[in-house]
Amino acid sequence: MKVCVIGTGYVGLVTGVCLSHIGHDVICVDNNEEKIKLMQSGQSPIYEPGLTELMKSSSQAGKLKFTSDLAQGVTHGEILFIAVGTPSLPTGESDTRYVEAVARGIGNHLNGDYKVVVNKSTVPIGSGDWVRMIMLEGIAEQQKVLVGAGNLPSKAQETQANFDVVSNPEFLREGSAVHDTFNPDRIVLGSHSQKAILMMKKLYEPLVNREFAQDSSLPKVPVVVTDLSSAEMIKYAANSFLATKISFINEVANICDRVGADVTQVAKGIGLDSRIGSKFLNAGIGWGGSCFPKDVSALVHTADDYGYEPELLKAAVNVNMRQRLIVLEKLQHELKILKGKTIGLLGLTFKPDTDDMRDAPSLQLIRQLDRLGAKVKAYDPIVSQSGASHGLSGVIIESDVAMLADGCDALVLVTEWKEFLELDYSKMAKLMVNPVIIDCRNFLDNQVVKQAGFQYLGVGC
Ligand code: NAD
Ligand code: UGA
């Protein structure tokens, strides 16, 4: 099928590349010319395991193209994905200006051929109908221009409004986005149009049949067909549930710290109950990234707009805010005064296997340590390697872990990069003023680290 994906970030690029890999003819559009040039040269603007290889093979096969020309993409695609960002406004609500610009742009370029317009971006409830309205405005604008030029064919607007909107929320995780796309737990499709749903089912057929899955013997991927609003709500509810689950285990961890229990054993003990499940029960420094914080805030905002006080969601956010700073309490307990001390951070990105720093817990920690007068150094496998500072201030980026450890009063493991399991902790301990390590992910083998000469502190254990 002919597909156009508009917005080539973590979601759009992965979606475009994976759809081309399963056989579709894909054009990816972005208004960032630099990104387009980079992708046309075969390079991915983001770090995502496995993505560059697929991108190259699809491009070579002629199945994947990149352009900054929206008109070209709209003309090409029978299915048009909107996959631009929807960041938080200071009020907590979702900033939908990029979605609006794209919807209007699509309307400006429709030519009467039937199109399915898919909201892949996470958008507030009601956005499906709103996108339709903006597209109709875009069509009217196009018509005005045509009338001005004196060459409007009759009934043009009616003919051009030949489209349906589908909500198709995305559930991929950064760091495993390609894997998640080929191995989805479910596919959600919300629309009033049977025709559009049938086309979306055809598009996803190879994934539903697990033709590209790690385990092709599993039953077919469930396809959940709903109305537009329910599909939009499924996305917010899923992220809010997962975020709340993490806040729950973080709260339990803080109680464990006080009563002397071990939250990792507690998580195992409760996770084996199939009603609870073992995933997303890792206590730590709190949830961050580009989605959980903004999506929970957006749902809180929607509830407020409709006169409902979302107490549980607000509590999940508050627990998370507090959790991000638990490490400061631990540092103050161990080192007393932080002014004049040197703290080394292992990891900066919000999770491993990504270069994404959006709302990373490390940023807040750096700000607070800086405010308290500590010197902050950091080593991160991606940030240190790329030399990109990601606009980080108040932190010295070291190029290896020995330089990080040198002269430190404490280390804080912020991101659970796999390579941190294999470090030479004995060497690092000897380079430090005070060999203390706070493992904010309960990731390291505490016996190994203790034998290397460290005083080890986890979160809730
Ligand atoms: P992103 O910021 O990484 O990428 C957005 C892209 O859209 C950028 O490349 C930007 O240049 C482009 N863009 C903006 N305006 C444009 C326009 N008018 N025309 C063409 N391109 C334009 O965003 P992301 O992380 O990929 O997220 C996209 C959406 O998907 C968001 O709504 C997000 O909530 C949702 N989502 C993200 C993830 C994730 O893991 N990042 C997962 C599920 C859902
Ligand atoms: C999350 C969801 O998992 C995806 O399904 C969703 O598509 C995506 O948000 C989105 O909407 O953007 P992502 O943010 O990439 O994916 O990463 P996660 O693995 O979910 O981690 C989110 C945050 O929770 C990270 O800061 C992570 O460190 C933290 N986390 C996760 C924990 O603290 N404990 C856990 O047990 C799991």
Image (cartoon, grey):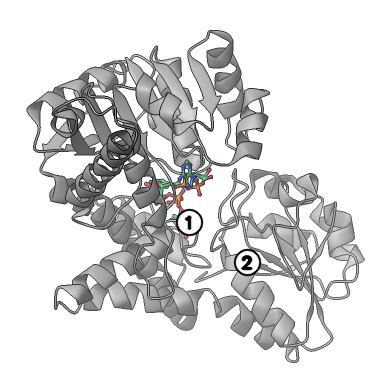
Which of these two is toward me, 416 or 62? Answer: 62
Residue found 73% across the figure and 47% down from its top: 381
Q: Is residue 307 above or below residue 131?
A: below
Q: Please tell me whether mark 2 sits on a helix, a strand or a loop.
A: helix
> Residue 354: x, y in percent?
59, 45
Q: Is residue 142 above or below residue 326?
A: above
Confirm or reject: label 1 Cβ below 8 Å from ligand 1: yes
* Left or right: 3 in relation to 379: left
Q: Which numbered disc covers residue 354?
A: none
- Measured in 3D between alpha carbons, the distance from the residue under mark 2 to the one under mark 1, in whole angstroms, is 14 Å
Q: Is residue 289 above or below residue 377?
A: above
Look at label 1 and name its amino acid. Ser
Which of these two is toward me, 330 or 173? Answer: 173
* Left or right: 298 in relation to 367: left
- Residue 69: tell me if it is visible: yes
Look at label 2 and name its amino acid. Ser
User: Residue 172 is drawn in which quadrant?
Assistant: top left
| Image quarter (top left, top right, bottom left or bottom right) of the N terminus | top left
Which of these two is toward me, 445 or 3? Answer: 3
Residue found 66% across the figure and 30% down from its top: 37
Residue found 36% across the figure and 57% down from its top: 96
User: Residue 443 is drawn in which quadrant?
Assistant: bottom right
Q: Sequence order check: which comes first, mark 2 or mark 1?
A: 1
> Residue 286: x, y in percent?
48, 67
Q: Which residue is mark 1?
A: 290
Which of these two is toward me, 247 or 97? Answer: 97
Q: Which numbered disc covers residue 362?
A: 2
